[in-house]
Image (spheres, helix red, strand yellow):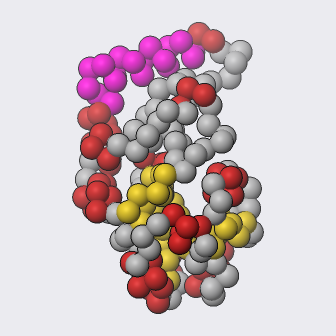
């Protein structure tokens, strides 16, 4: 693993997709316990299921990505959540094919979930080159430039600063990233 996050932990900021009819319910949520009582739909085998369960959230882990929005539409759970870097695309390309689904504008879930490079352990020279490259583009501002080109307006588009933030622990994360905390000012 190259311990240099590429997208400022953007994948760890989870934005719910809900049924439009539940908008008022989500709008009135003010504490963690209220979210924990709702059912979070997650496709089978996704690591998110472990993370949410370990944090006391109700999880409905079944099906796959192809049927998640049909199951949400049919009321088998209350919401599903995706990373801030992907939620708009997922919504536009998948959720809009179902009736009455929307991106919730009120809730933001967070846990450390950095996107990093993994290199085959037998290719240590490649790992060194990738890490050196990541340090170089981080130090010279190129990594920020790339991030801003693709995700620079994500905080505004999703109104991330206006949402109620609920922080979760990620028991699956390597020790190098245990101290990652939400920092919307850094996005």
Q: Position of residue 124 (x, y in %)?
A: 63, 12
Q: In terms of depth relative to the viewer, which is nearer, 168 or 88?
A: 168
Q: Residue at x 55, y 33 (%)?
A: 178
Q: Residue at x 69, y 58 (%)?
A: 53
Is residue 66 among what the camera can see? no
Placement of 86 over or under 76, stated as above or below:
above
Instruction: Report the quarter where the N terminus lies.
Output: top right
Q: Position of residue 44 (x, y in %)?
A: 74, 62
Which residues lie in the magenta part? Answer: 126-143
Q: Position of residue 75 (x, y in %)?
A: 63, 85
Q: Main secondary structure of the magenta part?
A: helix
Residue 46 falls left or right of residue 93: right
Q: Residue at x 42, y 22 (%)?
A: 134
Q: Residue at x 40, y 38 (%)?
A: 8
Is residue 10 among what the camera can see? yes
Residue 165 falls left or right of residue 35: left
Q: Position of residue 83 (x, y in %)?
A: 48, 55
């Amino acid at each position: 693993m190259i311990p240099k996050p590429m997208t400022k932990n953007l994948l760890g900021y989870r934005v719910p997709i809900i049924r439009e009819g539940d908008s008022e319910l989500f709008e009135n949520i003010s504490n963690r316990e209220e979210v924990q009582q709702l059912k979070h739909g997650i496709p089978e085998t996704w690591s998110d299921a472990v993370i949410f369960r370990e944090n006391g959230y109700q999880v409905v882990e079944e099906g796959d990505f192809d049927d998640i929005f049909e199951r949400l539409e049919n009321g088998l759970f209350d919401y599903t959540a995706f990373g801030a870097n992907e939620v708009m695309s997922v919504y536009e390309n998948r959720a809009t094919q179902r009736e009455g689904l929307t991106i919730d504008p009120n809730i933001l879930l967070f846990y450390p979930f950095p996107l990093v490079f993994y290199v085959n352990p037998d290719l240590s020279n490649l790992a060194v080159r990738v890490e050196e490259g990541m340090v170089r583009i981080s130090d010279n501002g190129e990594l920020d430039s790339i991030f801003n080109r693709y995700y620079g307006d994500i905080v505004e588009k999703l109104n991330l600063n206006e949402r109620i933030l609920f922080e979760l622990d990620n028991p699956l994360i390597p020790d190098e990233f245990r101290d990652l905390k939400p920092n919307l000012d850094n996005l």
